[in-house]
């Protein structure tokens, strides 16, 4: 099983933000993170999941995602995204990222587990550190869709 741990952070919401992702498969572990100059916490939470899924090289292996984001976990596990998709994400925040997520979900069929944030869960704490460090780093990326489409 591939385990993906995720967290996102934004300072100011909107403001500088970042995501942190840890991937574990057998004895292998990989950390991924990036920072953006202007974004939101929810975008970074979802981006952490997407980046983890996009990094999977071998489809067909069961995937479990551990996230402290009720926004992401509930949107998928309660099936909200399928109703949003039917309505072409009309007036939905982060539609670009949800459209990027759906083919990954269809291909990899991940399961989600919600974990309480800042509660001593080792991987969640590390993902938070990665996200915050990325948000505070130099050379922040441009979240172009967000900057061009925010109200």
Image: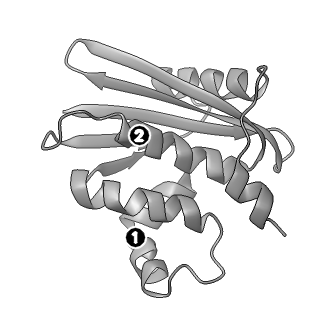
Query: Residue 101, located in which quarter of the rendered image?
Result: bottom left
For label 1, the SS is: loop
- Label placed on residue 27: none
Foreground pick, 97 / 41: 97
Of all residues, the one furthest to the top in this rendering is: 27
The N terminus appears in which quarter of the rendering? top left
Q: Which residue is mark 1?
A: 78
Can I make out residue 35 in this image?
yes
Q: Which residue is mark 2?
A: 66
Q: Position of residue 4 (x, y in %)?
A: 37, 34
- Crowd class of label 2 (few under 14; some 14 to 19; many from 20; radius 10 Å): many
- Asked if the residues shown at circle 2 and circle 1 are in contact, with their CB atoms under 8 angstroms apart, the answer is no
Name the residue at 69% across, 25% down: 134
Instruction: From the viewer's perspective, tell me whether residue 100 is left or right of residue 9.
Output: left
Relative to 34, is 30 above or below?
Answer: above
Can I make out residue 115 in this image?
no
Relative to 134, is 79 above or below?
Answer: below
The C terminus appears in which quarter of the rendering? bottom right
For label 2, the SS is: strand
Name the residue at 69% across, 31% down: 35
- Crowd class of label 1 (few under 14; some 14 to 19; many from 20; radius 10 Å): few
Query: Residue 142, located in which quarter of the rendered image?
Result: top right
In primary-sequence order, the first of circles 2 and 1 is: 2
Name the residue at 37% across, 41% down: 54
Instruction: From the viewer's perspective, tell me whether residue 20 is left or right of residue 27.
Output: right
Q: Position of residue 119 (x, y in %)?
A: 57, 30
């Amino acid at each position: 099983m591939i385990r993906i741990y995720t967290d996102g952070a934004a300072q100011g919401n909107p403001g500088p933000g970042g995501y942190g992702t840890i991937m574990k498969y057998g004895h292998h572990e990989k950390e991924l993170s990036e920072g953006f100059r202007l974004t939101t916490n929810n975008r970074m939470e979802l981006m952490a999941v997407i980046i983890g899924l996009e990094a999977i090289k071998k489809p067909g292996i069961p995937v479990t995602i551990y996230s402290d984001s009720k926004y992401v976990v509930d949107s998928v596990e309660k099936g909200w995204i399928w109703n949003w998709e039917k309505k072409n994400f009309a007036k939905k925040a982060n539609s670009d990222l949800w459209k990027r997520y759906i083919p990954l979900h269809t291909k990899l069929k991940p399961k989600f587990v919600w974990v309480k944030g800042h509660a001593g869960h080792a991987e969640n704490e590390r993902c938070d550190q990665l996200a915050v460090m990325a948000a505070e780093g130099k050379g922040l990326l441009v979240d172009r869709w967000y900057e061009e489409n925010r109200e």
